[in-house]
Image: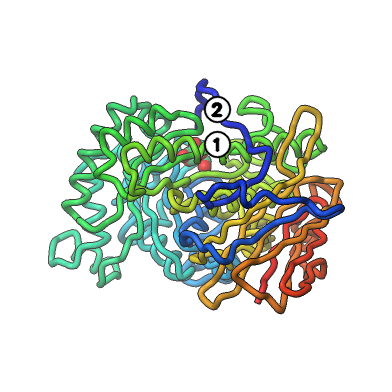
Amino acid sequence: MPRLHATPITRSFPKTTVVFGLLAATSSLHLQAAPGAAEMVIHADTPQWTIDRHIYSQFAEHLGRGIYEGLWVDEDSSIPNTRGLRNDVVAALKHLQIPAIRWPGGCFADEYHWRDGIGPREQRPVSVNTNWGGVTDDNAFGTHEFMDLVQQLDSEAYISGNLGGGSVQEMRDWVEYLTSDSASTLANLRRQNGRDKPWKIAYFGIGNESWGCGGAMRPEYYADEYRRYAQYVGQANGSLPRIASGSSGEDFHWTDVLMKQAGTMMHGLSLHYYTVPGGWANKGLATSVNEDEWAETLRLTLRMDDLLVEHSKIMDQYDPEKRVGLMVDEWGTWFAPEPGSNPGFLYQQNTLRDAMVAALNLNLFHAHGERVRMTAIAQMVNVLQAMILTDKDRMLLTPTYHVFEMYKVHQDATFIPIAFDTPRYRHGDIDLPMVSVTVSRDAAGKLHVSLVNIDPKESISLRATVPGMTATQVSGRLLTATALNAHNTFDKPDQVHPVAFAGATLHDGRLDVQLPAKAIVTLELR
Ligand code: AHR
């Protein structure tokens, strides 16, 4: 489980002009708000970094019904499948263009022995998933099945190796099995099991939450272990990008030690931060959302901004060229389990509030895209803030799915900075920026503007100039709902879904937007 650290975050959210991604003096960009409309400048004339598509990666762990039932149903299932992977879920996920999938954990990764998951399925051992409900795992879904999922989704693999409960030899052997083109016994074993060519692996994680479920280590000890494992993984495949197990939330000391002791041996350092309204001991239900819970959730999720700033500052000290990526490979909401579900399975519903969390975090990842180069939402199907929920042969797309679908236009696009005085959303003691905006330009020159209005009651008029582009056409899509806890069910799977948005107009290249309350909009400007 993630742990919280006592170190307070001191940085607060900016109260005045926000200039995302511009290092230039902000004074020249200060804006006079026109009566009734909040003004914005979209600086298409000063394009910045590429928004790495891997920010849109996802996490699929052997946890509850995430893999088994959610993705894997076996070849002889009555649920239509391709080589055991359910067709409906794969088709829906494929539409999201998921850049990479992190597997097999999570905490599960540090108790997973890859040899259990290869060879004839009927001969594979049965193990106990001690982290998640103590249920048995017959290892039907192993390396080849995962790589088949990756292939069916046109995605890439992010494999998490077992440092906590495994050995250096076991980890390096997995890498050889996966990626060697030689005639070694392990490479031939892979061939014997049906895969001739080596697989390309996008990332290899060396342990997970090594401060907690992955071995309860101190950072100094883990840093040494990381170096040793990374060395042997590198011997098996020198070009494999290696990811070190990073901090949880505000554990800045962990980041400091890892960067100092092992920074030169890593491609990325992970960060985990969950949005847990009520705290770990008092989590509420996903569907229980009054305005207090709404505001508190969004306050907590926006702390991601402070975390990215603070961890990046530390990384900058050791790596000013930003060679090492900050990989937020677990993020999202964590609510109480749905009544009647196994508490160890982390099955939760997903509402408009989750959609807000997803969009706000993606906006932040774009804005920190110089350092944040990969993230993985937890998790893909049936676990925590999922894209898809399944019930036997039925499935539904969650509001979070729809955000990922609306936002996929930003993948690998160029980040465009904006200058914007956002009004505030205030509720009780909570005071947050009301509107979050992210803008990117794709390879074809189209501009995509995603806007999030977190205020549950107030709509807002926005007016934007776009130096560097004279747009003549605008279209858009809107995700909103009447109730704060609006969600899709198996009987009503289409309660929350994107619709065409007619609230944006262009006048001599200037953009006017009527942004509804509690809404997410993505516009396309041509
Ligand atoms: O995503 C669920 C769990 O959260 C992961 O297994 C672990 O890494 C984290 O504590």
Q: Is residue 111 or residue 378 the one in the foreground?
A: 378
From the top left corner, tell me how far across and down residue 112 is, in percent: 36, 44
Q: Name the residue at 29% across, 70% down.
A: 195
Residue 91 visible (yes or no):
yes
Task: Report the front residue among 483 and 523.
Answer: 523
Q: What element carries label 1?
A: helix
Seen from the viewer's position, the closer of residues 370 and 139 is: 370
Q: Mark 2 CB in 8 Å range of ligand 1?
A: no
Q: Furthest residue to the front?
A: 28
Horizontal arrangement in the rendering, residue 124 relative to residue 87 (left or right): left
Q: Residue at x 32, y 43 (%)?
A: 319
Identity of the residue drawn at 32% across and 34% down = 258
The span from disc 2 to disc 1 (Cα, nearest Å) is: 7 Å
- Of the numbered discs 2 and 1, the one sitting upstream in the chain is 2
Q: Which residue carries the number 2 mark?
A: 9
Q: Mark 1 points at which residue?
A: 306
Residue 516 pos. (x, y %)? 82, 56
